[in-house]
Amino acid sequence: MNRNNVDGIWYYLPLVAGIKQVEFDPYYGDPDKGFLAAPYDSKWTGYFTGKSKDYGLAITHGPSPVIFLDAVSFESVKVGDVSGGLHLDVMGTWYAEDSEWRGTWTITGGTGELKKLQGHGIFWGPGWLGDPEEYGVIYYSVEEMDGIEFKNTD
């Protein structure tokens, strides 16, 4: 994971009232596991510039580890000098002893000038610390991006 290659910051704020525990009935798995679903609002800077609506699912095991799956949806986002809608899938983990989220993101679809955009990357950072009015912070980098032509503005 190349932490020196930061391409932007993902700020997210869980909509606390929308966080729900997911129950399976019957459930035959590990009794120490928990399942949560959460919607949240995000702001992105850097390579992706815009606001997204996100929907996450977390699997917990006691206080640690936490596995997180997320669907990010931009109605409109700028990528360089082009824009359109964009969808990302995010998968990450958090371990209490490390206190930092780490994971990967992948573009799963786009519209407008981003219709053919493909790419993936990594993320890391402290994330949301529990204050319902403070955004969580995640740093991200782009490992590969293809499918759009950037205009030369020089």
Image (cartoon, helix red, strand yellow):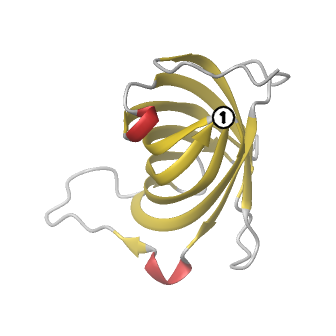
Q: Is residue 25 above or below residue 66?
A: below
**In the orientation shown, which residue stands out farthest toward the bottom?**
17
Locate the C terminus by quadrant.
top right
Instruction: Name the one closer to the observer, 8 or 13.
Output: 8
Instruction: Name the one closer to the observer, 100 or 82.
Output: 82
Counting from the top left corner in percent of width and height, residue 27 is at: 20, 59
Type of amino acid under label 1 = Phe
Q: Which residue is mark 1?
A: 123
Q: Residue at x 59, y 25 (%)?
A: 121
User: How many circles with numbers are drawn on the protein?
Assistant: 1
Q: Is residue 73 left or right of residue 24?
A: right
Q: Is residue 113 left or right of residue 93?
A: left
User: For residue 115, which quarter of the picture?
Assistant: top left
**In the orientation shown, which residue stands out farthest toward the front?**
154
Counting from the top left corner in percent of width and height, residue 19 is at: 46, 74
Counting from the top left corner in percent of width and height, residue 82 is at: 57, 35
10 Å crowding of disc 1: few (<14), some (14-19), many (20+): many
Counting from the top left corner in percent of width and height, residue 118 is at: 44, 22
